[in-house]
Amino acid sequence: MHHLNKTPPLVNRIHYNCTKITTMAATKITINANGSIKVEGDFEITDRSGGVYDLAGREVIGLCRCGQSKNKPFCDGSHNAAAFQHDAVAFALPPKKQA
Ligand code: FES
């Protein structure tokens, strides 16, 4: 019997100095309190036409969620001057509606 795996792709990370093996998502997105959305891991950021933003080798990026950045979609720290407030705490969404 086949099961569909609905979890995100996983990457095994091996610690060579010990026997501990941890598993983590290939991409981690952190909603920072009162600030940006931090994206790290394996990702690319595109515009709606599929054009890829050149991140100049950055492997961690902050996306603006306050709407005040002058460098959208990237965070430029303007959330501080704007006193943006949202203390993000993880929660569960309700079940998806059936089509
Ligand atoms: S979240 Fe940092 S400038 Fe908007």
Image (cartoon, rainbow, N blue to C red):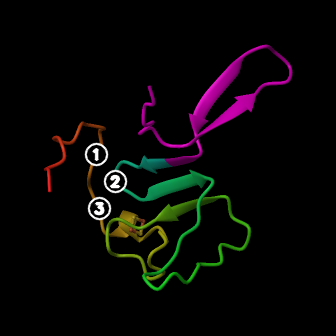
Q: Residues within 10 Å of mark 2 (few under 14, many from 20)?
A: some
Q: Are marks 2 and 3 in contact (CB under 8 Å)?
A: yes
Q: Is mark 3 within 8 Å of ligand 1?
A: yes
Figure check: 27 above or below 68: above
Q: Earlier in the sequence, mark 2 or mark 3?
A: 2
Q: Which residues are magenta?
A: 1-28
Residue depicted at x 44% and y 82%: 70
Dot 3 corresponds to which residue? 84
Q: Is mark 2 within 8 Å of ligand 1?
A: no
Q: Residues within 10 Å of mark 1 (few under 14, many from 20)?
A: few
Residue type, mark 1 in image: Asp
Residue depicted at x 45% and y 47%: 30
Residue depicted at x 35% and y 65%: 65
| Real-space Cα separation, disc 2 to disc 3, in angstroms | 5 Å
Q: Position of residue 35 (x, y in %)?
A: 39, 57
Q: Is residue 26 magenta?
A: yes
Q: Earlier in the sequence, mark 2 or mark 1?
A: 2
Figure check: 95 above or below 55: above
| Real-space Cα separation, disc 2 to disc 1, in angstroms | 6 Å
Q: Are marks 2 and 1 in contact (CB under 8 Å)?
A: yes
Dot 1 corresponds to which residue? 87
Q: Position of residue 99 (x, y in %)?
A: 14, 57
Q: Residues within 10 Å of mark 3 (few under 14, many from 20)?
A: some
Image quadrant, ligand 1: bottom left
Front-most of residues 7 and 4: 4
In the picture, residue 64 is in which quadrant?
Answer: bottom left
Please tell me the numbered disc located at residue 34: 2
In the picture, residue 90 is in which quadrant?
Answer: top left
Residue type, mark 3 in image: Phe
Q: Circle 2 — which element?
A: loop
* Total numbered circles: 3
